[in-house]
């Protein structure tokens, strides 16, 4: 692989980064909008805690894919209060237990994509992914067909997870 070294583009790249972060307001954030609606079942919000909440991902990687989010509209771990970070990690632990016990998952992927470049689809509002995994849950479809098949009813999974929390 060749590397193109172009230090003269640093100012442009940094300016674009600052602009993107500045323009991402809580008014435009789908997570903040769903939270404000206070229609938890409609928005698949599983449980509200003191500083954060857990919800089902509307575009899941796998059945039972959950998101843990702070109430505060912040993009970075270092911008949220330590109590919120601690609570979020406790919820991650609960979510992995629920995946194992309630969904009978063989394992879990836990991840945080900080920033667009890191793969965050909604980079302005920090969120932690907890994705249940089962042995053999991958196949040729995502590789060849560029499609992921998820055979479950989102409402039924929501009810099962809500009961477990």
Image (tube, helix red, strand yellow):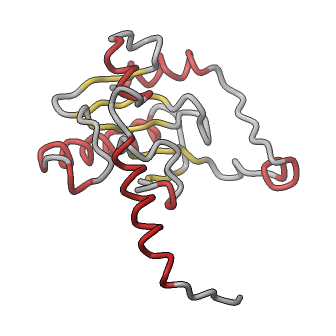
Residue 124 is left or right of residue 137, and the answer is: left
The picture places residue 132, in percent across and down from the top left corner, at 53, 43
Q: Which residue is drawn at 59% across and 36% down?
A: 60
The picture places residue 23, in percent across and down from the top left corner, at 38, 41
Q: Which residue lies furthest to the right in this view?
A: 144
Which of 26/78 is in front? 26
Q: Quadrant of the C terminus?
A: top left
Does 27 appear above or below 60? above
Q: Which residue is drawn at 62% across and 47% down?
A: 134
Which of 33/143 is in front? 33
Q: Which residue is drawn at 36% across and 56% down?
A: 18
What is the total number of numbered labels drawn onto the structure image? 0
Q: Quadrant of the N terminus?
A: bottom right
Q: Residue at x 24, y 44 (%)?
A: 90
Does 91 appear above or below 75? above
Which of 43/98 is in front? 43
Residue 62 is left or right of residue 109, and the answer is: right
Which of 83/154 is in front? 83
Residue 159 is left or right of residue 80, and the answer is: right
The picture places residue 52, in percent across and down from the top left corner, at 25, 33
Does 115 appear above or below 121? below
The picture places residue 136, in percent across and down from the top left corner, at 71, 52
């Amino acid at each position: 692989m060749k590397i193109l070294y172009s230090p003269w583009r640093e100012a442009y790249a940094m300016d674009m980064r600052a602009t993107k972060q500045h323009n991402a307001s809580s008014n435009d954030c789908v997570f903040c909008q769903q939270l404000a609606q206070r229609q938890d079942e409609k928005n698949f919000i599983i449980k509200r805690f003191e500083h954060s909440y857990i919800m089902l991902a509307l575009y899941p990687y796998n059945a039972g894919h959950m998101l843990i989010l702070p109430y505060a509209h912040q993009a970075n771990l270092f911008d949220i209060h330590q109590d919120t970070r601690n609570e979020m990690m406790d919820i991650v632990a609960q979510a992995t237990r629920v995946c194992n016990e309630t969904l009978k998952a063989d394992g879990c992927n836990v991840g945080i994509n900080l920033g667009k470049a890191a793969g965050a689809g909604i980079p302005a509002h920090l969120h932690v992914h907890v994705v249940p995994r089962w042995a053999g849950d991958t196949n040729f479809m995502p590789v060849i067909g560029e499609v992921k098949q998820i055979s479950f009813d989102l409402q039924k999974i929501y009810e099962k997870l809500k009961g477990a929390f």
